[in-house]
Image: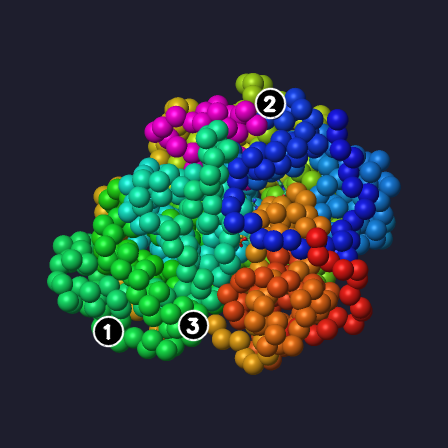
């Protein structure tokens, strides 16, 4: 039943370009999800796992962090095409055994794409490679942990880095940060640094919490919903259900994006038969095709127009009672928005004054507005001020703590928000550290550690001796791929706690160890007290349990909490004050500790077993209050700012295809955008093609420029595409080599993955065969 692993790697000459789709989901999506599942995992494993996705007592879908309803009934299929692909990817019955590693020298593996590596299957045994060796060979768990302990103890804590990817469950994350801090370092970079860090940096000082303030039910009450810098049809497909329901009941939905993503225009709900077969609903009522990086200018213009309307008809736009009692800084904000340079605004946004004014009119009319956003807003140099402008708009109209209103950063990885709650952060606050110290009698370090960008620097400067990766694929996810890979290869030890082979395993340190672990779907039952469950937090601060039921592909896999505990014991000694063994044996013990350390987790073990888990406290949402340093919501004033490409250049953003999960690829079909069987493409506006004197489908080399330095990535195919003029798009991670490490969002240090300045030169080789499908 199992489809064999592909023997051929990607051949970019096979690239096919078709027409972009105008609707998302529907029959095709269901068909694709079942096919992928059957091919990877076989019929029984597929059906068994799909029926348990996001159900009470089942497991949390590892696809994304969009929540499930906690008040209403769950649909029998509470998942989407891409969730199903994520499951098929993990539940695959294909295995990567010691025999596989013996067949593949590391030099050969380095030539493979991530697509090929990830398609090989689940890793079945701990593996290691040492300096001078050509192959990974098996290592016992005991030997692996001993080696890790020796390396860590041979260096200083500040030369050890503990990276976390956002699939890591709460209990694991809590133990992992405790391990780093017990050792004496806050070097805890995580994928959030590259993802929604800008959201936290904007929200914490303005509303006193680094998280969104809406619940799923708010989508049933909103009058106006903005979806900015986000591609929900691919990355959060279940969100389309909430949006199309809102639309059906008359809410207005404004999509703001340089690309006309399929999800905005049509949606056929695969969870209802009528929706699946019937006509698609237009999800968005309005679409603003904005220039990349133009959002700050747009939101400032909204502010200007709202204030002008208030001036004309006092008391109709600004929620004066709320602004006066709950916020600070309104007058300064109002003064700053009094004037507007329309020419600069139109230039920055690529939108007309008429369009902007029309959408501002919707805001003026709406009594309940939600702003949703994702990476289109977080990976820009001016991301943090841009997001602060959203907060200004929400504060002005009192859109906090009332039904149908609030801020909704839509998170990525299924537990990225929970990992932060658990203390995975390189800049921990004193409260958390003091609570850890009191609970465990440890001495947490106070000095801040590395974030993901600083970790890249540290690799380059040979300041990392030991790198431990809890999931993820750091080498490919970050900027400056080549420099990072070279730095990683100079580290003394790299340790990867992983499910499947990836690039980071093959650009490893002098010694490298791969520790294979159970995934979300796998049964975790090797404990004296019986099977264990873990917990996660979704994008709307709901904590709930997750428990896999599938038989693991190998008897050698260990659960993540067990791996952390054994690593901790090897590093810190058998008699360390933290009860590592007890925690690994019974996850209730971890949760009891968490309940005493983290606010909002009181009585964790009882509440997590409730029907829907529980919701963490959220002052703006619960009580319209703001736990900032001034005890109020804060208006902020930011200068006008936009991206500007010099003559002959374009702004390049990087994004996900429909067939990938971050650095892992399910396949090579970006169905909604009409791209198939290839990934090295640059989507480019047809007018830009003409102006730059370039041909559609031409092969080019891409040169990115930043502060006088250039980086180059070769052999991309230009594809004429209706993206905003001046703004090209390429896929992540193929384009990461182009991202200069100093191109970051100010304040959050998140890489400017959506803000490169590039130009194209003809590729030195001739184009392949004709490409149209
Ligand atoms: N199937 C699937 N699901 C996923 C993931 C996956 O890889 N695959 N990844 C998960 C993770 S970790 C995350 S963080 C999320 C990511 O979810 P998204 O943020 O939706 O991911 P991207 O593909 O990066 O898409 C960014 C969107 O922003 C737009 N954009 C780019 N620049 C700008 C700009 O300057 N202004 C505006 N307004 N828009 C802009 C792009 O055109 C694109 O539509 O998805 C999560 N879910
Ligand atoms: N150019 C560009 N770069 C980007 C982005 C972008 O938009 N553009 N987005 C950024 C964002 S938002 C993010 S979140 C990062 C993602 O960065 P990461 O989180 O580091 O990368 P992933 O690709 O999500 O990690 C995939 C690997 O996780 C492992 N894995 C999967 N499931 C499990 C599990 O259950 N347990 C364990 N231990 N391991 C598991 C597998 O081995 C797999 O190879 O990339 C960032 N990089
Ligand atoms: Mo992410």
Q: Which residue is mark 1?
A: 338
Using the numbered discs, state the Cα–Cα distance from disc 2 to disc 3 in whole angstroms: 50 Å
Q: Which residues are magenta?
A: 50-77
- Mark 2 and mark 3 lie on one chain; the one further toward the N terminus is 2
Q: Quadrant of residue 322?
A: bottom left
**Camera-nearest residue between 629 and 656:** 656
Left or right of residue 290: residue 154: right
- Mark 3 and mark 1 lie on one chain; the one further toward the N terminus is 1
Report the residue at 49% width, 47% height from top.
Answer: 263
Give percent across and percent down for residue 50.
57, 27
> Taken as a whole, is the magenta stretch helix, strand or loop?
loop
Give percent across and percent down for residue 351.
40, 68
The label shown at residue 348 is 3
> Which callout, 2 or 3, points to the residue nearer the camera?
3
Residue neighbourhood size for the residue with mark 1, other residues' Cα within 10 Å, grouped as few (<14), some (14–19), many (≥20): few
Left or right of residue 51: residue 41: right
The label shown at residue 48 is 2
Q: Are marks 2 and 3 in contact (CB under 8 Å)?
A: no
Q: Quadrant of residue 532?
A: top right
> Which callout, 3 or 1, points to the residue nearer the camera?
3
Give percent across and percent down for residue 352.
38, 70
Task: For mark 2, give the secondary structure.
Answer: helix
Report the residue at 37% width, 30% height from top.
Answer: 70
Visible residue check, residue 756: no
Task: For mark 1, give the secondary structure.
Answer: loop
Report the residue at 72% width, 55% height from top.
Answer: 15
Q: Is residue 639 above or below residue 281?
A: below
Q: Is residue 456 above or below residue 176?
A: below
Residue neighbourhood size for the residue with mark 3, other residues' Cα within 10 Å, grouped as few (<14), some (14–19), many (≥20): many
Q: Say if the magenta span includes residue 758.
A: no
Visible residue check, residue 31: yes
Q: Say if the magenta span includes residue 60.
A: yes
């Amino acid at each position: 039943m199992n489809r064999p692993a592909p023997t051929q790697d990607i051949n970019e000459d096979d690239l096919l370009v078709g027409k972009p789709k105008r609707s998302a989901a529907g029959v095709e999506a269901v068909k694709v999800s079942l096919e992928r599942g059957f091919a990877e995992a076989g019929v029984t494993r597929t059906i068994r796992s799909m029926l348990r996705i996001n159900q009470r007592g089942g497991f949390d879908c590892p696809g994304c962090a969009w929540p499930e309803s906690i008040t209403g009934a769950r649909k029998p299929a509470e998942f989407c095409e891409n969730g199903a692909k994520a499951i098929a990817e993990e539940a695959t019955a294909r295995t990567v055994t010691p025999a596989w590693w013996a067949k593949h020298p590391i030099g050969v593996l380095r030539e493979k794409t991530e697509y090929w590596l990830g398609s090989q299957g689940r890793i079945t045994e701990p593996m290691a490679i040492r300096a001078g060796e050509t192959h990974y060979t098996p290592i016992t768990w005991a030997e692996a942990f001993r080696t890790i302990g020796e390396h860590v103890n041979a260096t200083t804590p500040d030369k050890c880095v503990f990276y976390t990817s956002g699939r890591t469950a709460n209990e694991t994350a809590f133990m992992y940060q405790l391990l780093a801090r017990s050792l004496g370092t806050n070097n805890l970079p995580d994928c959030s640094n590259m993802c929604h860090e800008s959201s936290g940096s904007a929200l914490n000082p303005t509303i006193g919490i680094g998280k969104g303030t809406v619940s799923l039910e708010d989508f049933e009450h909103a009058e106006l919903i903005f979806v900015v810098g986000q591609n929900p049809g691919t990355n959060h497909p279940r969100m389309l259900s909430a949006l199309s329901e809102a639309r059906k009941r008359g809410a207005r939905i404004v999509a703001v994006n340089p690309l006309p993503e399929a999800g905005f225009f049509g949606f056929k709900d695969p969870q209802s038969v009528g929706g699946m077969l019937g006509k698609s609903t237009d999800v968005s009522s309005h679409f603003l095709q904005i220039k990349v990086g133009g959002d700050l200018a747009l939101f400032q213009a909204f502010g200007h127009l709202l204030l002008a309307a208030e001036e004309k008809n006092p008391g109709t736009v600004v929620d004066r009672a709320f602004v006066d009692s709950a916020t600070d800084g309104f007058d300064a904000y109002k003064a700053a928005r009094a004037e507007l340079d329309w020419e600069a605004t139109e230039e920055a946004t690529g939108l007309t004054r008429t369009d902007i004014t029309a959408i501002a009119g919707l805001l003026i009319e709406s009594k309940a507005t939600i702003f949703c956003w994702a990476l289109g807003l977080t990976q820009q140099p001016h991301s943090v001020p841009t997001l602060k402008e959203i907060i200004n708009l929400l504060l002005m109209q009192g859109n906090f703590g009332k039904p149908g209103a609030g801020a909704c950063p839509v998170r990525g990885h299924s537990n990225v928000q929970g990992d932060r709650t658990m203390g995975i952060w390189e800049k921990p606050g004193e409260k958390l550290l003091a609570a850890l110290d009191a609970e465990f009698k440890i001495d947490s370090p106070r000095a801040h550690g590395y974030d993901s960008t600083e970790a890249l620097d540290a690799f380059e400067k040979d300041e990392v001796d030991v790198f431990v990766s809890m999931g993820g694929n750091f080498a490919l996810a970050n900027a400056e791929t080549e420099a990072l890979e070279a730095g990683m290869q100079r580290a003394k030890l790299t340790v990867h706690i992983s499910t499947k082979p990836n690039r980071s395993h093959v650009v490893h340190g002098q010694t490298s160890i791969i520790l294979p672990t159970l995934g979300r779907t796998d049964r975790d039952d090797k404990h004296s007290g019986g099977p264990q469950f873990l917990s996660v937090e979704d994008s709307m601060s709901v904590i709930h349990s997750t428990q896999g039921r599938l038989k693991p592909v190998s008897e050698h896999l260990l659960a993540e909490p067990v791996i952390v505990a054994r690593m901790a014991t090897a590093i810190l000694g058998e008699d360390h004050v933290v009860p590592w063994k007890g925690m690994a044996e019974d996850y209730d013990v971890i949760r009891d500790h968490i309940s005493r350390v983290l606010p909002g987790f009181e009585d964790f073990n009882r509440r997590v077993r409730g029907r829907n888990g529980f919701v963490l406290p959220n002052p703006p949402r619960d009580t319209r209050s703001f736990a900032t340093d001034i005890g109020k919501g804060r208006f902020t004033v930011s200068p006008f700012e936009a991206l500007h490409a010099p003559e002959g250049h374009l702004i390049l953003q990087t994004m996900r295809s429909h067939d990938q999960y971050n650095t892992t690829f399910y396949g090579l079909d970006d169905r909604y955008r009409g791209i198939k069987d290839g990934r090295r493409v640059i989507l480019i506006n047809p007018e830009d093609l003409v102006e730059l004197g370039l041909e559609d489908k031409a092969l080019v080399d891409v040169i990115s420029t930043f502060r006088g330095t250039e980086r180059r990535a070769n052999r991309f195919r230009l594809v004429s595409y209706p993206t905003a003029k001046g703004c090209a798009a390429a896929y992540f991670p193929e384009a990461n080599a182009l991202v200069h490490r100093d191109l970051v969002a100010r304040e959050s240090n998140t890489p400017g993955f959506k803000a490169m300045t590039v130009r194209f030169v003809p590729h030195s080789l001739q184009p392949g065969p004709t490409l149209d499908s």
